[in-house]
Amino acid sequence: MGLKRLLREVLGDDVRYVPSSFDIVGSRSGAIAILEFPPETPERVKRIVAEALMKLHKNVRLVLAKKSGRRGVYRLREYEVIAGEGGTEVLHKEHGVLLKVDPTRVYFSPREATERLRVASQVRPGEFVMVMFAGVGPYALMIAKKQPEVKRVIAIEINPDAYRYMVENIRLNKAEGKVVPVLGDVRYEAPRWYGMCDRVVMPLPKGAHEFLDQAFQCLKPEGGVIHFYHWAPEEELYCEAYYLLEREARLRRAHIRVLDARVVSEYAPRVYKVCVDVLVRPADP
Ligand SMILES: C[S@@+](CC[C@H](N)C(=O)[O-])C[C@H]1O[C@@H](n2cnc3c(N)ncnc32)[C@H](O)[C@@H]1O
């Protein structure tokens, strides 16, 4: 039964504050629930919701409420504890990949598991892949899991906490040697792999376009695939993403062919995170 239905009687009119969805990060052995309440929600209601949620999901030992939007280069937000106890570090499992993560110190969204699986499923044996903006390693590790014959996955992350978790997650998933973690700014680290990649994944909707020059230059001379993430309003879902990709291709004397374009998630009302997959080839001389 959903939370709203469960609490309708207890909360009466206040049931309008109960979020219709929430995230659970963690596993059977311990998880954190993350909720977003309307700003005017009374503290009493938050507590009742959190306690009901912990009864419904016995593995949830801590309930957090979002206190801000995502901010800064690391894409973090503030949280308040509304029920439960214990630390904020948990072990999460998605499609067989183990991810140790502290959602208060690093970016992590369990909602994007299907998208990661979609990208990982396209990787072919022998590919050399770069994951920019790698976080705690969910894309890189999903790729290594789903395509064990991948040659290498370079995973670049700027947040030292996320990098530390990524290193641990590589060990947990026995992906040492396959996934290469790199701590630093894509702008300065990516040039080490110019001309070497078959595929570049760019999961930073806020600002990936500023790194398209790096992505194009990392591809092999014969080209490759770019998975480009971007935010877009409902009325023009892919226009800007296509324009940015086309513009970079022209600058690099390359052709692009759109392989796929899809909505990944809703970021804000009527604003979506989209992904455009393109095949890049050198333009004919
Ligand atoms: C939207 S999160 C995605 C993280 C991860 N790929 C995932 O799916 O969970 C973007 C990540 O990029 C990192 N980041 C932002 N700017 C960066 C840069 N210039 N170089 C490397 N990493 C960067 C942030 O710290 C954050 O962890």
Image (tube, rainbow, N blue to C red):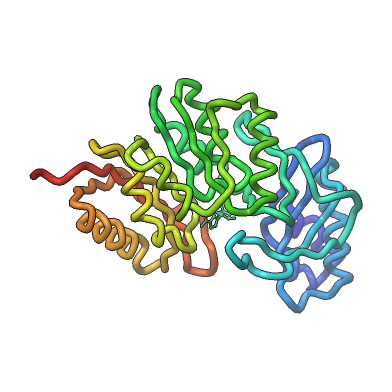
* Residue drawn at 22 percent across, 58 percent down: 251
- In the image, taking residue 259 as reference, residue 174 lies left or right, namely right
| x and y percentages locating residue 39 in the rendered image | 73, 76
| x and y percentages locating residue 62 in the rendered image | 84, 52
| x and y percentages locating residue 178 in the rendered image | 53, 27
Count of number-bearing discs: 0
Residue 122 occupies quadrant: top left
* Residue drawn at 40 percent across, 47 percent down: 191
- Which residue extends farthest left? 285
Relative height, residue 206 to residue 102 (above, below): below
* Residue drawn at 73 percent across, 66 percent down: 78
Relative height, residue 140 to residue 145 (above, below): below
Front one among 150 and 116: 150
Front one among 210 and 82: 210
- Which residue extends farthest bottom? 40
* Residue drawn at 27 percent across, 57 percent down: 248
| x and y percentages locating residue 91 in the rendered image | 75, 38
Front one among 274 and 222: 222
Image quarter where the C terminus lies is: top left
Front one among 187 and 17: 187
